[in-house]
Image (cartoon, rainbow, N blue to C red):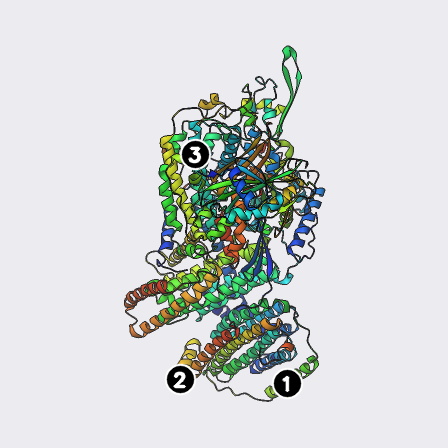
Amino acid sequence: MFSVGLDHYLILSAVLFCIGLVGVITQRNVIKLIMCLEIMLNAVNITLIAFSMYITPAALTGQLFAIFVMVVAAAEVAVGIAIVFSIYRSRESVDMENFNLLKW
Amino acid sequence: MPDLVFYLLAAIALVASIAVIMVRDIFRAALCLIVLFMSVAGFFLLLHADFLAIVQILIYVGAISILIIVAVMLTRDARQGYPLDNYKYVAGAVGILLLAAIAYGILNTSFVNFGGAPPEQTIQPIGQALFGSGYVLPVEIAAVLLLSAILGAIAVLRDK
Amino acid sequence: MEIVRPEVNTPQEADAVEGAYINSLIADSTSAIPDPDRWIDEAVHRNVFLTTTDTILAWGRQRSIFPMLFATACCGMEVISMSVSRFDLSRFGMDVVRFSPRQADVMIIAGTITWKMALATRMIYDQMAEPKWVVAMGACAISGGTFRESYSVTPGVNRIMPVDVYIPGCPPKPEAVIFGINRLHAKIIKGTMDDPMLSKP
Amino acid sequence: MTLLDQFQKTLLASGLPDWAAYLVPALMGVILIVAVSLTLVIIFIWWERRLLGRFQLRLGPNRCGPEGILQPVATGLKLLLKEDIVPAKADKILHFLAPIVVFVPVLMIFAVVPVSDGAILANLNVGIIYVVAISSISTIGIFMAAWGSSNKFALISGMRTVAQMVSYELPVVLSLVGVVLVAGSFSMLSIVQSQSIPFILVMPLGCVIFFLGCLAEMNRSPFDLLEADSEIVAGYHTEYSGMKFAMFFMGEYGVALAYSTVITTLFLGGWSGPLLPPVIWFLIKVVLVFSFTVWMRATLPRLRVDQLMAFAWKGLLPMAVINLIIIAIEVLVVPASMLWVMVILNFAFAAALVLLWSRLFTLGGGRVEV
Amino acid sequence: MTVITSGEELGKKIAEAIPGSVVSSDKTSVMLESKSLAQVAEFLKNTPGLDFNYLNFATAVDYIDYFELVYRVLSMEHNHSLILKTRLYDRENPAVPSLVAIWRSAYFQEREMFDMFGIKFEGHPDLRRLLTWEGFQGYPLRRDYL
Amino acid sequence: MPIKTEPFYLNLGPQHPSTHGVFRLRVQLDGEVIVDVEPIIGYLHRGIEKLAETRTYTQVIPLTDRLDYVASMTNNLAYCLAVEKLAGIKVPERAEYLRIIFSELMRLANHFLAIGAFLNDCGALATPLIYMWREREKIVDLCEMTCGQRLLFNYMRVGGMSQDVPVEFMPALKKFVAEMPKFIGEYEQLIKQNEIFLARTKGVGILPREMAIDIGASGPVLRASGVNWDIRKKDPYSIYDRFDFEVPTGDVGDCYDRFWVRMREMRQSVRILEQAIGQIPAKGTVWADVPQFFRPPAGEAYGHIEAPKGNLGFYVVGDGSIAPYRVHIFPPSLMNVTALRDMAIGWKVADLIIIFGSIDVVLGEIDR
Amino acid sequence: MKFERYGMGIAKGMALTLKHLFRPPLTVQYPNEKLVRSKRIRGNELVWFPDRCTGCGTCTKACLQGNIILVTHHGEENKFIVDKFELDSGRCIFCGLCVESCPYDALAMGLEYECAKYRRGDTILDKEKLKLSDKHQPSAYFRPQFYAQLPEQSLLIYDRKEGGQKLTLFPLSKRKRGPGA
């Protein structure tokens, strides 16, 4: 039971994912929201690599997918923070409540 | 031994991730996020994905978290953060429900090992897989994505 | 003197606050602070170390003093002369000149301290970490020198902080300052002034 | 197969419990790294102070032990027992953690540097990326210090840190990829083994770019903006005293030393050399690289922030990219046994590129541009 | 060699241009009415042939009965100089027009005179204590300050 | 990328590594870009003008030493010129030459420090300062040989010099003057073409010609802005009209020009020294025997010289007693910092430091 | 910044510093080796010859800060006898005006400059200390009669062969123990 297997990794990443999700729902600070998104992406990465290790150790497919996830994460943070700056510039706030316009 | 390390890392990861959403000071939250990233890198090492572990540190710790820190620094008056709003019970419920569902799924599925030993070193296979067969197009698309992200960021922040 | 910084919003307010502090500093420092003769002894009593440990510590402290160059006026030039190639203070391990008072050990007050500056001097002294020493270099720092009668000059820096070594001269020659620093070394390592080696005419 | 691996094997074979077989070699490795690298750092601090003194026609510390070699020891002793001040407004936790976060990654770099054949603590097959990744962690430490001490000078220094480190990471990595292409491996050991001609000759431009990038990453002159004492007093460690300051101080020199070893390994052929034992060769090369940085420190003025950034983005980065493309083509075209062809070609390309850049591009001159 | 302009000739010129401004004049200096100081300065700076574009120094002397303000102005093109003087008899609240708008080099010197003598310069953009601190009692360079 | 940031105040000084003493700059920053600068002075205000009223004419000379302590003998000269003008004293020939020699030595000494400290501000870790200081030490040695002190000489007197130079002085001076051009050449090699230095200084902190005149700048700061104004040429005092030298000027008025004007002035100073060594009478008195407590007539006099930093003037009012009634000191540095705000706005903190360094102020003179 | 000269300027500067690396350092290892100071040195003390002093008080008038305290009383043969002669070396600026003004050559500047003290009171030179001082070698400042007795000053301009300051190429540390060495 206590020797670590695939299940442990999956449960762990599920817990992390849910924490991230709770964060995304509850946070009002946009920067923190982005941070919570990063937690969720990391949880997904753990899942991918755990599957890669335990299901198809030779093929490394999961690791390849993790790389693509990282690429997406980097792009998302760059654009996300650019948008945060842009809104902060006009509204002087990073509160989600102020992000209700489609144009700024 | 690897099991011990796993539990240790898991504890760190959970504490750090909970701290990210609970800590009010946003700079400290960002530091907790870094701790989480490092522990995830530790999981990658445990899973024999050493290349990805290093890339995780390089990208998440070296780049993304620094970007977040810059954002924290430049939005100084918002540093203290805001209280969690009224959704927190709803969110907690949703989270727990989702977690229960996933856990149920995981525990009731038997995963099949398709066999084969994990490769001794991962860099070469990853490289060959990425650029050799099948994944060239996604790699190119990823490159385009990154480029467009950079351009988009610049476009958003440009003086109007 | 306790310095509490009230919230100020404009530069003018800040100036007024500073002026008030200067006036209270003048009112407070009418008599000289006694020279810390027994300073080292007290320190030894305070933390009981084994003798060897104590010696090693004193050795470390004496060999690597980070000076805080508090060069306000003419003597500052001689401080530079002393630290550059001809007299080279770095031979004593003092080449790591720290401009942050937190990291400095000895404050070499080189030059006239006016009342306007005395406030900053005192604050910097308070910011320095223990153990700390003060060297008053030149006539102005010791007693106000030729400007002693002036309305704006502190008559001796020992009115606002205890001074460990006085180096007379206007300005003292670099060798004289190095001699003073050697005496400070001796003070650090011996912890007493009754050393026959030091009783130089 | 490194010595520690073998040790672990024997331990496992001898029937020790599982965890002990993992822990004992790891602890030994840690102790070895800390001891050796701290000693080296102390010696190099002394060496820099002496050498800098000689560049400036003076002697440098020479009264403490033979030729003053105990000087850093005395400094360390003194700092150890100096009062530790935490400013009232500071963020206590960050203020406490920052020196550790700066200092530990520096030590971790030494783990993958091969001192001679097989004498490496961890022969990672991702050695080079490991170095880059680990060293980016200390940026966060510096930023923690800057933020945590709630001092304006420190905050300016922190802003500069982020910009500088992030900008110079790119050219450094890109010039590293050239090395990897020619050597065909990420592992430090095999990179050294593949240098029949030192890579400084094979890719001079890459070496220069990497060296400059390293200077910026280790905050040495002329890129020492983080603690430009004529501008921002002592930079991010303005509010630090005592042992914490000592850790910053050691970390600063430690990172300089670490990068010197990395440059030696990647571009100067590591331990290889005739006659003398490999360790001596390695040390000689490290001392040469380190002395070169001291020489630059003794001569050059400091760049301004925007010039620094412009130099990274407009100067080093495009040159690194072009250099990488050239090397990639050469690796495809030139057979591996004929490295000397690449030497000639690359010198020509490097000269052409430098000429082109110095003619065509203005790097951040004139008014402030953001 | 900087020519010291004859104060008598120039005094006449000034008196013609701005009547009632000159009190007296001798070989080197022109004594002015304190109120017309700014006008005269304007005249000296902008009149072709005089072009006193450079204020060399400005100071005050406390003669106990009155303060004497001394300005030495210079023309870089013609290389000639002139000393302007004016007297302030009000000891409690001496005031004089500021010259900062005409020669910016008066900026610090007028602040210094305010600090040292308590002379108010009307129209000075930022008349505060310069050398001593805020809250300093008295004006040190007056003869009665001890 | 103008992200809206709150402007914040930064106090540079009064104790800051590159304020050359106790100068305080209250800087308002936006990011690192300077929005406003306010120089706050007075941290070294010692009341020299007040003290001079209570001391005899001779006793004021040690006080004047402490004004511009980098080149203290020039202050003596300016004060002595003013008092000599007041009392109508004629200075002996040999003393005039000695005055020229020492004031040119002081100019060299000052420029050594100015350039060295300026480069230190640019971030070159003390090496240029140290090379300069080595040469300065040679000058200091010469002065110490003459009057026994290394910094505050108290050498000139009203009516000449306090004593003649010793016999070893002239050979040593000749050797120094002979070595000097080589050293200046070496120094130009060290820094003049350095790209980083050029990038830091060229075009930075421009002081336009009109503004330079308007703020009453003088010395190298004025000349770097393209104004050919040197009191040694335009209003020759002492015996400067006997020497042949040029007045170097800049054309833009940026930091580099100020540096470069100083470098060229050093060469001219060496030229003047060479001529003075050739012309000086071998023997003769150096002091017009002025009694220690002499009483100049009531009146006023203004003596000014081209000090290393600019136009240094002394306005002395005598009332017929042994002590001056009023001594006003007109310091060049005070005028030169007037335009600091205009020069620095829009630049970064690092530029502010080098702009301030290129002005070359000394606080003893600003605050008096 | 524009590298018009391809970094040649930087290279030139670095060549110059490299040249300096191989020049002998100028450093005087002070407590172990001392520079010979000027013959006219104004050291941080006065040398007083009590037998020549008549107590006329010219020096007290010449002193610009009233630092010399001289108390006398009338002795026999209409001479002054000095009761108190005291000056504060912590306040004196060593301008030399008192020495210049002394009509009987009873005061001279001293050679001594190593005068650092631990206590403020120690800096005051009273009559007893000054009485001992005439055993010291006075400096030749305004006292040319002492000029010949003093050693030649070691100047930085001359190198060692010409009697100047000692320059050594690779000096080893001095193991000798000076005060605080």
* Closer to us: F287 or G1: F287
- Amino acid at the residue labelled 1: Leu
Identify residue for label 3: F100
Q: Is residue D111 visible?
A: yes
Up/down of D45 relative to F55, above or below: below
Q: Is residue B81 above or below residue F301?
A: below
Three-letter amino acid code of the residue under disc 2:
Ser
Regarding mark 2 in the picture, which secondary structure is present there?
loop
User: Residue D359: percent from the left, percent from the top?
Assistant: 35, 63
Q: Where C131 sits versus G152, above or below?
A: below
Q: CA–CA distance between discs 1 and 2?
A: 37 Å
Badge 1 marks a residue whose secondary structure is: helix
Residue C140 location, quadrant: top right
Which residue is identified by label 2? B133
**Mark 2, other Cα within 10 Å: few <14 / some 14–19 / many ≥20:** few
Q: Quadrant of the N terminus of chain D?
A: bottom left
